[in-house]
Amino acid sequence: LRRGERPVPPALPVQYGDYAHWQQRRLAEGAADRGIAHWRERLADLPSLELPTDRPRPHVRTGAGGSLAFELPAELAERLGVLARERGATLFMVLLAGFQSLLTRWTGQYDLAVGSPVAGRDRTELEPLVGFFVNTLVLRTDLSGDPAFGEAVRRVRETALAAFEHQDVPFDRLVEELRPERDLSRNPLFDVLFQLHPDQLDALPLDGIRTTSLDTANGTAKFDLSLALTEHPNGLTGTLSYASDLFDHATMERFAGHYARLLRSAAADPDAPLSRLEVL
């Protein structure tokens, strides 16, 4: 564009309509029935997560929110990566185990459901295609019995692998089939979200043009609490998004500090039970 030339994008092997057709065909062939049977069993008698809030929950969600950014240093990220490899897991699983372990410490609950988005691009020809493919999985983990952190990672790994195997069921279809009790103050099935992003470019390499990325806060929150972590060469960047009707910013600062401290304690001694992991 800068040189006055018309860009010629490469030909795409498929279109979004092909993806929609494949998905409908999978559902028609019974893939959804098998997946729904799995989720029906996995999510039976799912309890609500009762986070300690600074204010009573409003009767209807307003969507008002705030956000908090924090950093996990490269040294800690590397140690967590080593721990993941030693346990046959991924960094995502270790970080999620830490998140759910902290939720257990904050709530006193051991049956925890956390939502997590997946890219949904399970075919290589979909990678260059513009479109919305994301689906959301419900990752329910039982952390009862005060397990060691390494055992918590094993349980999270088991949960995640089973969820990935049945990720074809669209989340809205799952809600429609399971028919959870609806509450205008909550989301269906989960109120806490977790995600890990790979390293992302801070600037687009455009010929003769300098660009920088800008993070903007929109003052909204879809969930009670969501944690997004992004890998980069200097460690991990975390963003906590929270419902400001429920939480003060200072509470989220404390939560982020507890998370970092718990991960450091777990990396140092993964055989320690969750109740003994340091958060202060």
Image (spheres, helix red, strand yellow):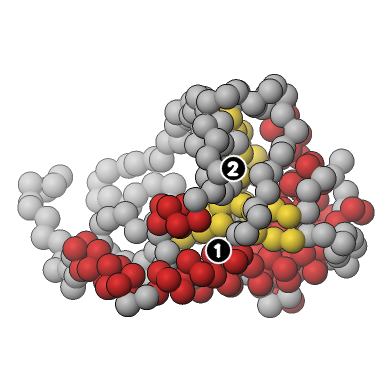
Q: Position of residue 57 (x, y in %)?
A: 64, 26
Which residue is painted at 88% across and 49% down in the image?
A: 278
Q: Which residue is mark 2?
A: 191
In screen coordinates, is 14 left or right of 33? Answer: left
Q: In the rendered structure, are the residues bearing label 2 and label 1 in contact, judged by CB atoms less than 8 Å apart?
A: no
Residue 9 disc label: none
Residue 151 in sight here = yes
Q: Position of residue 244 (x, y in %)?
A: 60, 25
Residue 40 disc label: 1
**Is 7 above or below relative to 159?**
above
Residue 40 is drawn in which quadrant? bottom right
Residue 230 in sight here = no
Q: Position of residue 229 (x, y in %)?
A: 58, 50
Residue 255 is drawn in which quadrant? top right
Q: Relative to the observer, which residue lies in front, 238 or 38?
A: 38
Residue depth check, mark 2 versus mark 1: number of the one nearer the observer: 1
Which residue is painted at 68% across and 43% down in the image?
A: 49
**Is 197 above or below relative to 35?**
above
Q: Relative to the observer, which residue lies in front, 259 or 49?
A: 49
Q: Position of residue 231 (x, y in %)?
A: 56, 56
Amino acid type assigned to the residue bearing label 2 in the image: Asp
Amino acid type assigned to the residue bearing label 1 in the image: Arg
Query: The residue tagged with tag 2: helix, strand or loop?
Result: loop
